[in-house]
Amino acid sequence: MRPPLTEKQKKLLDYLREEIGRTGSAPSLRVSAADLEISHAAVAQTLKTLEDKGYIRRQGKYSRTVHILDHTGDVDAGLSRKQIPIIGRITAGLPMYAQQEWEGSLVIDDRLYPGDNLFALRIQGQSMKNAGILNRDIAICQPRQYAHNKEIVVALVHGEEATVKRFFLHPGFIELRPENPKFKPQTYEFDDVLIQGKVIGIVRPPDAMNTGQDH
């Protein structure tokens, strides 16, 4: 059995539960301190106490990722969520989590999509529709700089254009293959393609089914 909480500790825990449930991530120390009208040091100390008592688990000493635990020590099923950025434009040379052009964020279930630095991209066009990826879908991606044959990847072509296609490695060239017979596979030299990530899930906005022609 976990040690009981003081009134102040319970207040912070309830606050964290509400904010994580609402936004998918824990607020910063500054925001928490302002909302609760206490000092940064008090928030930091109380977080440590909550962790020591088994009510929360933090992902690294300075990480803002906080998991609320249930009485068994597992992550609370209703709060296993996290916030990932929707990348507007991929910039060559920058890791995905350092990209500057964000088009908002997406809250996902950490149990379904575990891992750090996940990112999302909005799909444009219908070139992958036979793989169940439609225009305006949001692709959840795991950052990676390599790919295996037949994986659906995010590739940066010629350092400029990001595309989502199925990957094939051939002797002497790379093939990026669409999943729609109206589109032709494209082939590239090795140096023309930078793999940025692997698509691990799709989120479909309510209006995605009714938008976009083949293009």
Image (cartoon, helix red, strand yellow):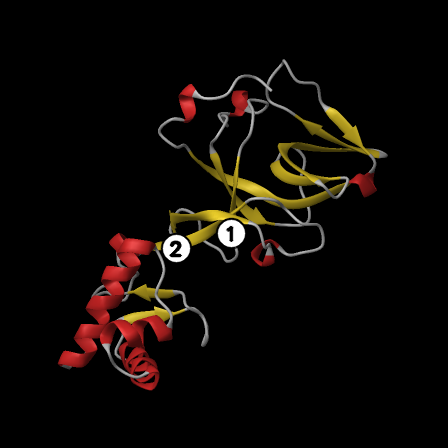
Q: Nearer the viewer, residue 107 or 48?
A: 107
Q: Which residue is mark 2?
A: 82
Q: Amino acid at mark 2?
A: Lys
In which quadrant will I find the C terminus? Answer: top right
Horizontal side of residue 156 vs 120, given as left or right: right
Q: Who comes first in sequence, dot 1 or dot 2? A: 2
Marks 1 and 2 in Cβ contact (< 8 Å): yes
Q: Secondary structure at mark 1?
A: loop
Q: Please say if 3 is above or below 109.
A: below
Q: Secondary structure at mark 2?
A: strand
Q: Nearer the viewer, residue 98 or 193?
A: 98
What's the mark number on residue 5? none
Q: Nearer the viewer, residue 91 or 12?
A: 91
Q: Residues within 10 Å of mark 1 (few under 14, many from 20)?
A: many
Q: Which residue is mark 1?
A: 118
Q: Is residue 207 visible?
A: yes
Horizontal side of residue 92 vs 117, given as left or right: right
